[in-house]
Image: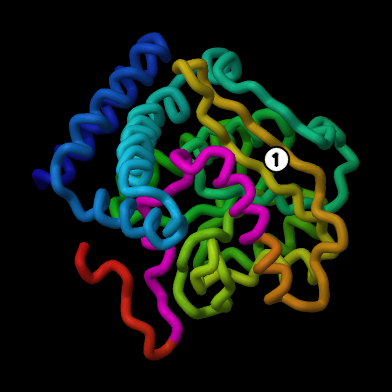
Amino acid sequence: MLKQLMVGCALSLLKLLAVLPYGFVARFGDLLGRLLYKLPSKRRCIVYTNLKLCFPHWSETRCQAVAAHHFRHVIRSYVERSVQWFGSAKKFEKLVEIKSEIDLSDPNLPPTILLGFHFVGIEAGSISLNYALKRSCGALYQPMSNLKIDQAAKQARARFNAQMISRPESARTILRMLRVRTPVMLASDMDHGARNSAFVPFFGVPACTLTTVSRLAKTAQAQVVPFIGEVLPNYKGYRLKVFRPWENYPSDDPLADARRMNAFLEEQIELMPEQYYWVHKRFKTRPPGEPGFYDAC
């Protein structure tokens, strides 16, 4: 009962923040992130562990600085759900700068998988991409444990005519959409366990990586178009970056395709390491016999 009350209060707070100026909301989220980072926590430990694994050449000073900056971004991204979920379409549109290498308004797009990555701006990027398409679009999501938050998130993400697809029942639905040329947004850069995955290097560390993008694209004869949501400096909003379709993808080797996906992601992370979603246990699943990395957390 108490948990449900807290969830209700949190959603009410987001709705309230949605009507306030974006600059105030962003600064509030940043300040909250600064304060929470000072408290010892499991998530702070996970962020630091991931950074040390991926950037062993970094100094301790840089690692700590990026970890702190990232924590501020993460908490801020939760606070900014207010604008993304409950703000008016006009207000949201003004906050997003779109930089696309394909014509998103083209009604004759071939079967297209829009491949997102878990930077802190993925929520804003995904919603603005669906808005820019001006047409129905499939969007894969992971159901949340709290039903009230899950319902609120689905409604918010679908408000610009997205068709939400639950991950557990996704493959057939995605293929059906692609066959009628409905674009589908999905992400495959998190550790979802060994099923439909392979251990592929990510910054030199074997990472359990989904191979489903390659297989779906091959079955549906779909092009794969990467996109990234970036948080702009000085509280100026977001930039949606949509890249050209990957050439010669998929290949006949799902492992090579997964490595190519990770290599692309590594290049983008190098440009803004503080914005990647390091609070996730990216290396949770280990090859047989290898010890875990997060036991100390």
User: In this image, 186 relative to 100: left or right?
Assistant: left
Q: Which residue is mark 1?
A: 136
Looking at the image, residue 242 lies above or below residue 31: below
Residue under the point 32% across and 81% down:
291
Question: Element at badge 1?
Answer: loop
Q: Percent x, y for residue 66?
A: 38, 40
Looking at the image, residue 145 lies above or below residue 28: below
Amino acid carrying label 1: it is Ser
Residue under the point 26% across and 23% down:
31
Q: Which of the pair 201/42 is nearer the observer?
A: 201
Looking at the image, residue 195 lies above or below residue 2: below
User: In this image, 168 relative to 19: left or right?
Assistant: right
279 inside magenta stretch: yes
Q: Does residue 134 show up?
A: no
Q: Percent x, y for residue 41?
A: 18, 50
Q: Which of the pair 208/110 is nearer the observer?
A: 208
Residue under the point 51% across and 74% down:
206
Which residues lie in the magenta part?
262-287
Q: Percent x, y for residue 88?
A: 50, 17
Query: Which quadrant of the figure has residue 106?
Result: top right
Q: Residue furthest bottom?
A: 289
